């Protein structure tokens, strides 16, 4: 379950990082000089630190909290069923070793029942894990749509030609703090977000 959670959180961060690579509109307000070596014209650029956004955007925090609760519920459900299975297996072993079954057929029936119980538990684990992954994917899309929608509105006034995402210095080795719009984006997203309108 921990491995699944780590994978899902990684996908979550990648989905948000992908969002910012698609957010760029044309304008020339307070242009930034692009690289002369590339022969480019003036381009207005900004960047957003994804790690900060994910930890400070209330919608993202609520989605993460919801997923954590679901993970805990799944873990509790599976642990309870696993404990019952262990108990039934131990009881079967005890009875079998002490000739506690009325007949070999009755012992076989009980053995088959325990095997079915074990199979059902494995199937339940796969089903719940798949449901959690689907829920996480749905959340990623909702988060991406939310951020994209806000960036498009935000950029109508700001007029950036390019907004770069930066996750743990993956896409950006250095950025002048003057071009960092992370706090503006977080404040705008949180001002627009209403928990009552979400799940």
Image: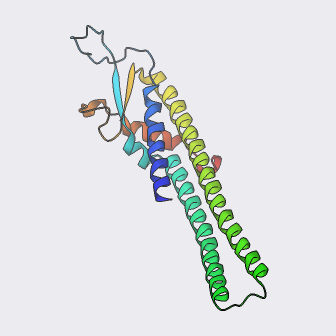
Image coords of residue 75 (percent x, y): 56, 65
Image coords of residue 84 (percent x, y): 64, 77
In the displayed structure image, the side of residue 175 where residue 92 appears, left or right: right
The residue depicted at 46 percent of the width and 59 percent of the height is 2
The residue depicted at 64 percent of the width and 75 percent of the height is 85
Task: Please tell me how many numbered marks the rendered image carries.
Answer: 0
Image coords of residue 30 (percent x, y): 32, 18
In the displayed structure image, the side of residue 182 where residue 75 appears, left or right: right
Image coords of residue 149 (percent x, y): 55, 31
Q: Residue 127 or 131: which is nearer the viewer?
A: 127
In the rendered image, the residue lying farthest to the front is: 104
Q: How is the image coloured?
A: rainbow
The residue depicted at 66 percent of the width and 85 percent of the height is 96
| Image vertical order of residue 90 relative to residue 174, above or below | below
Q: Quadrant of residue 165?
A: top left
The residue depicted at 75 percent of the width and 82 percent of the height is 104
Q: Residue 69 or 118: which is nearer the viewer?
A: 118
| Image vertical order of residue 10 relative to residue 157, above or below | below
In the displayed structure image, the side of residue 144 where residue 21 appears, left or right: left
| Image vertical order of residue 111 relative to residue 40, above or below | below
In the rendered image, the residue lying farthest to the left is: 37
């Amino acid at each position: 379950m921990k491995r699944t959670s780590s994978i899902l959180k990684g996908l979550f961060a990648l989905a948000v990082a992908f969002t910012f690579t698609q957010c760029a509109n044309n304008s020339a307000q307070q242009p930034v000089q692009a690289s002369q070596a590339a022969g480019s014209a003036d381009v207005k650029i900004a960047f957003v630190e994804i790690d900060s956004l994910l930890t400070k955007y209330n919608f993202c925090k609520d989605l993460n909290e919801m997923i954590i609760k679901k993970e805990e519920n799944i873990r509790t459900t599976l642990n309870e069923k696993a404990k019952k299975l262990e108990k039934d297996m131990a009881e079967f072993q005890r009875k079998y070793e002490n000739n506690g079954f009325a007949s070999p057929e009755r012992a076989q029936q009980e053995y088959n029942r325990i095997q079915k119980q074990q199979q059902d538990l494995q199937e339940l684990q796969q089903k719940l894990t798949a449901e959690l992954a689907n829920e996480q994917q749905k959340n990623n899309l909702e988060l991406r749509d939310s951020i994209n929608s806000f960036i498009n509105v935000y950029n109508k006034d700001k007029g950036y030609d390019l907004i770069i995402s930066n996750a743990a210095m993956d896409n950006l080795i250095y950025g002048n703090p003057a071009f960092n719009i992370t706090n503006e984006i977080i404040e705008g997203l949180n001002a627009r977000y209403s928990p009552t309108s979400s799940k």
